[in-house]
Amino acid sequence: MNAKENKKYELIVRIGNTLPEDPALVGMFVELAAIDFTTAIEMWEYMMNLYATDLSKVDIALNLERGIYAAFSAKSDARLRQHLGESPPLLKSIYSSSATAATEGNLAYLVSLVLNSKIDAAGEVFRLISVNKNSNLDYGERMKSIIDEIFRTYCAAKGVAVPSLNRKQTMLLLEYALKIKGPNKNLLVQRVKELG
């Protein structure tokens, strides 16, 4: 075994013995990703699954989900997105367990799925968000931020003031806007209907 492989296994052991809220964890994942990106993703999936119930705590979610997501995205956003698309357990941890679901990097991933008309994949992410029972996550507020970000991203990319989504995109947003309970429901349903 060469020095690089030794370092990889040493990092795996250190990560496995580190608490999810420890700020040093992100640095360890960065180091592991530099050696073997796929192994780093697999180790992240393991840690996210291991601490799935703890992801409802904001400090743990900020470190274990958001911090590591941002680090992987900076290393290779394309590879990260590919791994996300191939890992239902990781998506489940991010979107149905974490207090940071549908924010920052993982919000950008969902927006890209919708705007690239990957409707089945986007629908699965929306489903996971809709079953997230985290007390720190208000479904109506998250849906509002998702729809706002989809519209903002579309308008910025196309240089227009009003988005123009296709029927499947509109129906997907409408399906999950209708699940909102509370003050954002009517506003968001109306905004989405105006696109169709």
Image (cartoon, rainbow, N blue to C red):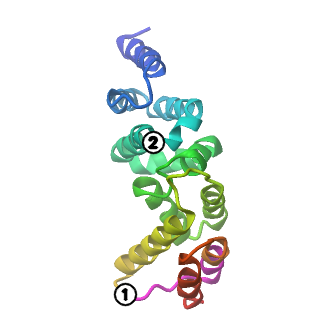
User: What's the CA distance linking mark 1 and mark 2?
Assistant: 35 Å
Q: Going 63% across and 60% down the picture, which residue do you hit?
A: 130
Closer-to-camera residue (85/135) = 135
Q: Which residue is mark 2?
A: 61
Rendered view: 99 above or below 10: below
Q: Provide the residue span drawn in magenta.
A: 160-172
Q: Is residue 166 in the magenta section?
A: yes
Magenta stretch: residue 129 in it? Answer: no
Looking at marks 1 and 2 on the same chain, the residue that comes earlier in the sequence is marked by: 2
Compared to 186, does 5 lie above or below? above
- Residue 82 is labelled as none
**Relative to the observer, which residue lies in front, 124 or 38?**
124
Residue located beneath label 1 in the image: 160
Tell me what residue is drawn at x 64 percent, y 83 percent: 167
Query: How many other residues sit within 10 Å of disc 1, few (<14), some (14-19) or many (≥20)?
Result: few
Asked if the residue at tag 2 contacts the one at tag 1, i.e. Cβ–Cβ closer than 8 Å, the answer is no
Q: Secondary structure at mark 1?
A: loop
Name the quarter where the N terminus is drawn.
top left
Q: Is residue 68 left or right of residue 134?
A: left
- Observer-side mark, 1 or 2, equals 2
